[in-house]
Amino acid sequence: MIYVRDDDVLMPSSSHPDPLKHFKTVHEWICETPKLLHVPALVVRPLSEMPEAVEYIKEQKGFNKMSPQVHGYEHIDYAKLSKQEVKDDLERCKDFLYEKLDIIPSRWYTPWGANAPHLYDAASETGLKLVDCSVINKMNGRYGLIQLAKEGHDIEKIMQNKEIFFHWWEGGMRLKRVVEILKYGSYESAKAVNGDWF
């Protein structure tokens, strides 16, 4: 299984005036192959104001298509808060996710990859593992997954039980390329079948 870590989920974005519609599109792409699992990092406050999004996430989680995790109650720099303030915030997140989505999260993906020592302590003391940005597998760039696939590497083998990182509000073309490569087994096969994405 390859996990698709999707940060800043449903945060307002000028590039996507209907965030839920775009989020659903991204999720549907991820679901095109059973090799991927969608791991949205949820920002609770904006999500709490979107009951339709809450229902959609709950439904998809129930189908085992999604494994939502914590990003924060607000999208803030948690390193500037005291350990107790962080713990209180994380508990609010966990309470909401359990009450509204029947989720017991296990990971905290901090905004901007914040990783101050007191954040690790706060996460641990609230039953979460802090996952920072020290290891990020991106889709683009010189060593990105798409480049590796172009060079003939097996993405599925390279990424087994690892996470691909992106922000939900990105256009999505790179993610769609990765989905197509996984569906068809190689960059060349995917390009031959669906050249529009390549």
Image (cartoon, grey):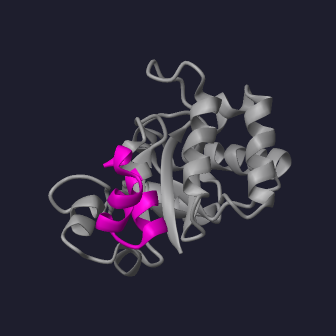
Residue found farthest to the front? 192
| Image-based side of 136 in relation to 148, left or right | right
Q: Give the residue drawn at x 33%, y 62%.
A: 137
Answer above or below: position of 75 versus 26. Answer: above
Q: Position of residue 65 (x, y in %)?
A: 68, 60
Please check the rendered image and state whether residue 193 is part of the magenta-colored stretch, yes or no.
yes
Answer above or below: position of 20 versus 162. Answer: above
Residue found farthest to the left? 142
Residue found farthest to the bottom? 157
Front position in the image: 71 or 36: 36
Question: Which segment is the magenta one?
Answer: 177-198
Q: Give the residue drawn at x 66%, y 58%.
A: 66
Q: Position of residue 120 (x, y in %)?
A: 46, 61
Q: Position of residue 170 (x, y in %)?
A: 41, 36
| Image-based side of 129 in relation to 52, left or right | left
Front position in the image: 50 or 126: 50
| Image-based side of 38 in relation to 14, left or right | right
Q: Give the residue drawn at x 37%, y 55%.
A: 115
| Image-based side of 95 in relation to 165, left or right | right
**In this view of the protein, can residue 159 be seen by the observer?**
yes
Q: How many numbered circles does the render carry?
A: 0
Answer above or below: position of 42 versus 106. Answer: above
Q: Position of residue 47 (x, y in %)?
A: 68, 33
Please check the rendered image and state whether residue 60 is part of the magenta-colored stretch, yes or no.
no
Res 15 quadrant in image: top left
**In this view of the protein, can residue 41 be seen by the observer?**
no
Q: Main secondary structure of the magenta part?
A: helix
Res 173 quadrant in image: top left
Front position in the image: 115 or 140: 140
Front position in the image: 176 or 125: 176
